[in-house]
Image: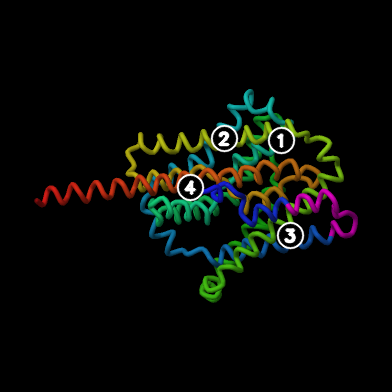
Amino acid sequence: MSLRRFLPDNFTLCLIATVITASVLPCRGEAATVFEWLTNLAIALLFFMHGAKLSREAVVAGITHWRLHVVVLASTFALFPVLGVLLKPLLLPLVTPALYVGILFLCTLPSTVQSSIAFTSIARGNVPAAVCAASASSLLGIVVTPLLTGLVLEAHGQGGMSWHAVGDIVLQLFVPFVAGQITQRWIGDWIQRHRPLIGLTDQGSILLVVYTAFSAAVLQGLWKQLPLPVLGGLLIVNAVLLAAALLITRYGSRALGFKRADEITVVFCGSKKSLASGVPMANVLFPAHALGMIVLPIMLFHQMQLMTCAVLARRYAQRMDVDKRSATRTEELAAD
């Protein structure tokens, strides 16, 4: 097996470089204010472009497979938060209370879109259903995530999320998204022809939020509060959550009688969490001094899920190929 599959991608390297830069040269004073404005503008542009890109036809085409979508959404917005709360006695001793809040926030996030679809395709899964499920998760997450965050934080004894925070999410994320959908008929084709622009906006906005978040956290003494054993504990917590989600979605979909292609879609759409949505939402929902601890679990989980799912997708693909060859031989023998 090639070691390249386990190496971080270019974007992850950029994230690491951004964290290092924020640790050495944190923005402060007027510079911090300028970066905050730039971050808000970049996030609004990001959700506007996603609204303009999202194909309503693809959503309508895949929405008929309602059982699969219910399972994916239940895994994303119910299974993960339940795991985060119920596993508190196991998880909390491994991390600090502030990091555990970040874990709870991670559990409320929507699924990824691009990587969920890409891994489903690699694994020979139901791609149209994956497009619909991942897109629906991303869209619903704009409203569901802040509400769920309030519920799980209240269960954790941190206090609920205010309606003001929900309103900020609607104003900064949902309104640009709807504006993009409205203007899709005029700019949708242009957006599709310039898809790399979406990627640059995605990554640029995340890097801006990470830089401002870690700058504020470093000025508050982040690295003094985060020794190496705690980082190791955070990796274990993320691994436990990811492994639990992968196992439950895999065997749960089989118990529900889904075909292999649909099982693949459930596994890859129901076990992931979106860095692209999570970082901008954290920027709206949490105070600047807390963002570093909130964002760090998402960043580590992002890389972990990519590495794990890359291997899992290829194994699924190999198994699908074997099944296809076996079916072909069976048909040939039956014909003889």
Q: Which residue is mark 4?
A: 269
Q: Main secondary structure of the magenta part?
A: helix
Residue flagged by tag 4: what amino acid is it? Cys
- Identify residue for label 1: 231
Q: Residue at x 52, y 50 (%)?
A: 137
Rounded to the nearest angstrom, the CA distance separating label 4 from label 3 is 28 Å
In this rendering, the answer to whether 168 lies above or below 297 is below
Q: Are marks 1 and 3 in contact (CB under 8 Å)?
A: no
How far apart are the alpha carbons under marks 4 and 1? 27 Å
Decide which of tag 1 and tag 3 comes sooner along the chain: 3
Label 1 environment density (alpha carbons within 10 Å; few <14, some 14–19, many ≥20): some
Q: Residue furthest left?
A: 336
- Residue 78 in sight from this viewpoint: yes
Query: Would you identify the image quadrant in which residue 235 lies?
Result: top right
Write down the residue under mark 3. 40
User: Which residue corresponds to mark 2?
Assistant: 241
Please name whichever residue, 115 or 184, is drawn nearer the observer in this view of the structure.
Answer: 115
Mark 1 or 3: the one toward you: 1
Please determine whether, in this image, residue 269 is positioned above or below residue 174: above
**Position of 246 compared to 216: left or right?**
left
Question: Pointers 2 and 1 in contact (CB under 8 A)?
Answer: no
At mark 1, the secondary structure is helix
> In the rendered structure, which amino acid carries the disc numbered 3?
Asn
Residue sticking out furthest to the top: 89
For the residue pair 127 and 10, the one nearer the viewer reads as 10
Determine whether label 4 and label 2 are within 8 Å by CB: no
Question: Where's residue 262, x and y in %?
Answer: 37, 47
Image coordinates of residue 287 in percent, x first then y, are 78, 45
Going by the image, does 231 lie left or right of 133?
right
Q: Earlier in the sequence, mark 4 or mark 3?
A: 3
The reply to whether discs 4 and 1 touch (Cβ–Cβ < 8 Å) is no
